[in-house]
Image: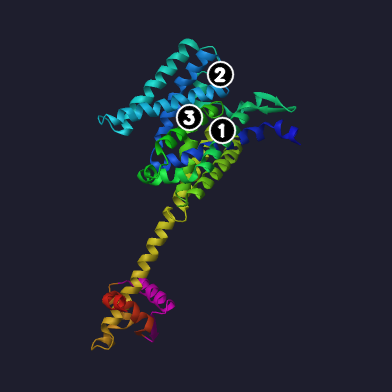
Amino acid sequence: MLAAIFDNPSVMIVLTGALVGTAASLVGTFLVLRGNSMLSDAISHSIVFGIVIVWMLTRQQSGPVQIVGAALTGVFTVFLTELLVSTRRVKNDAAIGLVFPVLFSIGVLLLNIYARNVHIDQHTVLLGEIGFVWLDTVDIAGYPVPQALLSMGAMTLANLAFVILFFKELKLATFDRSLARALGFAPGILSYALLALLSGTAVAAFDSVGAILFIAFVIVPPSAAYLLTDRLWLMLVYGCAISIMSSIAGYWLAVSLNVSIGGMMAVMTGIFLLAAFLAGPRYGMIAQIVRRRSRERANECRTLAVHLYNHEGGPAQDEENVAAALHDHLHWDETRARHVLRQSIDQGLVVRDGDALALTERGRVEARAILEPWRQEAV
């Protein structure tokens, strides 16, 4: 059975994509919450410099040494960025824009000069090719396992272990850095460790999705999850689930349409983000429109209750507390007046006897709460 799985290119491609998305979402969630999403862009570009340097020193195109070396370049990028920000001459976004183009351009120049004939060319670094991951395998217990699957599996486990072991510290450092520092949680070290893992994940993902598409996996699934929940652990789960579903749906659509597999996987993350933006239960556009309309209807019912309460028992009661007055005195059209009246009756605020309208006890309490709030506070 295992042999059939490892011999199936489609399964290997989808598994690799799911691991890239899961590993990226685990660390990307904290970047999104801290407002540092674009650091993933800076790191994923600048580690090209690290990849070339490690290759020039060791002649290794992949493996642990390559991942560690490039990850250190990512940390170096963050260090240079914070160093520029500490001068107070440039802001954080400007510092990112200054640092990563320099390192990236040096990396590209070194690629052209010293690594033109090796596998690490610009196309591989920027776009990757997940469709070929099943061709580059190593033999493990007699099974041909893709190297990309191994490297991404290792990074996913490393990221997951880091998040589980330091979940409390990461949560506190993300939402209240000063308190985390006061409690001795060393938020600066945690931040560098998180970014080192991000850099390592980017390097491991190069063969699969490349630097540019990796950014989509880091930012988009956590952003979609952010629109679905306020709980951090659920945001991590949703981000990973969106990444896995994007990989499955992206592969199926890419094969059907004969387009780039990695590109379609990244597009699917955008589709899920759009769906969360439109139909998210709390922050989705549709949910906000429904809640706003619900509040408007509730206010209309309160307006009717106040109107009836003001004229209840007064000389103008027979003229004001009738259905026809809703159009003449509240300036509601017939459809709106009929809808508000029906809703007020359903809520038990108003009773109707022919054309005459009267408040129930609940309707009077509602009107008094608006007109005489100090009495409610006294009670």
250 vs 86, nearest the viewer: 86
Which amino acid, mark 2?
Answer: Gln
Q: Earlier in the sequence, mark 2 or mark 3?
A: 2
Residue 159 percent location from the top left of the image = 53, 37
Q: Can you identify the residue that label 3 sits on?
A: 199
Q: Can you identify the residue that label 1 sits on?
A: 155
Which residue is most to the left?
A: 315
Residue 74: name its quadrant. Answer: top left
Q: Determine whether the residue tagged by mark 1 lies in a helix, strand or loop.
A: helix
Which amino acid, mark 3?
Answer: Ser
323 vs 252, nearest the viewer: 252
Question: With 58 as the anchor, is 79 left or right in this view?
Answer: left
Q: Residue at x 61, y 38 (%)?
A: 252
Residue 341 belongs to the span the image colors magenta: yes
Quadrant containing the C terminus in the rendered view: bottom left
Gap between marks 2 and 1 measured at Cα? 17 Å
Which amino acid, mark 1?
Answer: Met
Q: Are marks 3 and 1 in contact (CB under 8 Å)?
A: no
Q: Residue at x 41, y 43 (%)?
A: 173
Residue 304 belongs to the span the image colors magenta: no
Evaluate whether residue 360 shows in this view. Answer: no
Q: Are marks 2 and 1 in contact (CB under 8 Å)?
A: no
Q: Can you identify the residue that label 2 sits on?
A: 61
Magenta residues (range): 332-354
